[in-house]
Image: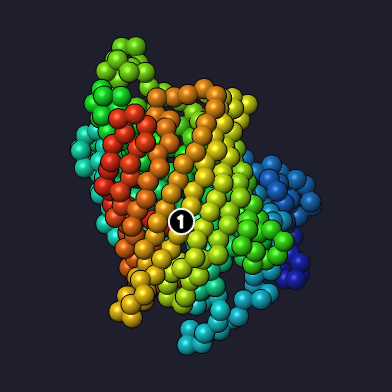
Amino acid sequence: MKVTDLTRPGEQELLELERTYCSFGDTVHYIELPKIFERCEGSWLFDLEDRPYLDMQMWYSAVNFGYRNADIEEAHNRQMARLPQLACQYLHREKIMLAAIAPRFWLPTISSDKDGVVAGAYTAGQDALAYHSYTLDVDYGAASSRFYYNAAYAYDYFYPTFTIEAHKKPVLYSNFLNRGDYYEENRSYSFKVSVPLNRMESKYSFILGYMWQRRSALSGLDGGGDFNGAGVFQGRRGNVFAGMDFSNTVRYPYSISPEEGRTASLLYRLYSKAIGSDVGSQEYVLSYSEYLRPYSEGYRHDVICLKLKGGISAGERIGRQAFQLGGDARVDLTLGYRLKVTPALGVAHGFNQDGETRVYFLIYSSL
């Protein structure tokens, strides 16, 4: 075949060249007469004469967001225009920051659900400039065959700071209303914005967010939906929250938690059927933490943390809605990164009637 113009061959000439030089293993030969297209946009393909064809199979493979998606093209072009095109023996900022955010440790976790032991692993990471931070806890109950998780991510490149969290965990109410140990599954998703007041490095910040939450029973219930005769709540507790935080804590290079100072926060939550809750109520929660350093050269990076928390609520009540005050003494471990991860041994006491004293061990993390 003689091609009259290699710079702009027509459709028949292109098909002839394709039959001669292209692989017939290509998927274009699933149809008897392959079509040649000149351009694409959105969900449409355009042939050499600019006739539009609606692509009915674009979703199944590699074009899930449409052809020439403007947002993706803009992000790609912006990054390609500035990303250093360097050989692997040279360093650039993106390479270092990407490597820094990878997990550097895994801590074992252990808890329980109604069927027995739940075990898993916890990790956290932060890039070198602290723009991106995350925590991840994944657990599995061998007897119940249930997966649980707790994940959080904070983006702090611009102000305000954005935080998203996802949570699915078993919760134990020990000797619930003197009817035995009651387990429930608590699942939630939340989005929070933190805005510093007056100036960038303010000690005060305003927080605002939304949480979707669902509680469901893991323990067996009676025919009427009660637990050994005690009423339990199952359903949604979606809420909006707002509050104020204060912190004058001091952290040093390679510290994983504050080493001196204090934090205080006041948080208000509104539960309403209009925002995804099956009950209507309000909560006010106040928390306070004091970080104390032992005045001894041998323990200059050890910290004692005293913590108080309490609150009040109004509106519809559920069986597992009570506030407790307590304190804990934390034992900080320096693990070689700047993200705060603190194993804690503590004591909590309930001040309601017949309140109990509990000793507990937790792993705290903060973004």
Circle 1: element type: strand
Q: Would you place residue 160 above or below residue 180 in this image?
A: below
Q: Count of labels shown?
A: 1
Residue at 56% across, 31% down: 282
Furthest toward the top, the residue is 224
- In the picture provided, is 360 more to the left or to the right than 272? left
Which residue type does callout 1 highlight?
A: Ser
Position of residue 238 measured from the top left corner of the image (x, y, whole percent): 54, 33
Q: Residues within 10 Å of mark 1 (few under 14, many from 20)?
A: some
- Which residue is nearer to you in this view: 257 or 326? 326
Frontmost residue, 279 versus 221: 279
Above or below, 258 against 318 in this view is below
Give 248 or 57, whichever is nearer the viewer: 248
- For image coordinates 55% across by 82% down, the residue present is 92
Q: Tell me: 211 left or right of 169.
A: right
Which quadrant, please, contains the N terminus? bottom right
Q: Is residue 121 visible?
A: no
Residue 4 image point, x, y percent = 75, 68
Q: State the residue lying farthest toward the bottom.
A: 89
- Give residue 19's position: percent from left, percent from top: 57, 60
Kindly identify the residue that appears in the image at 64 percent across and 72 percent down. Answer: 80
Relative to 337, does residue 280 appear above or below in the rendering? above
Q: Is any atom of residue 281 visible in this view?
A: yes
The residue wearing badge 1 is: 289
Q: Quadrant of residue 158?
A: bottom right
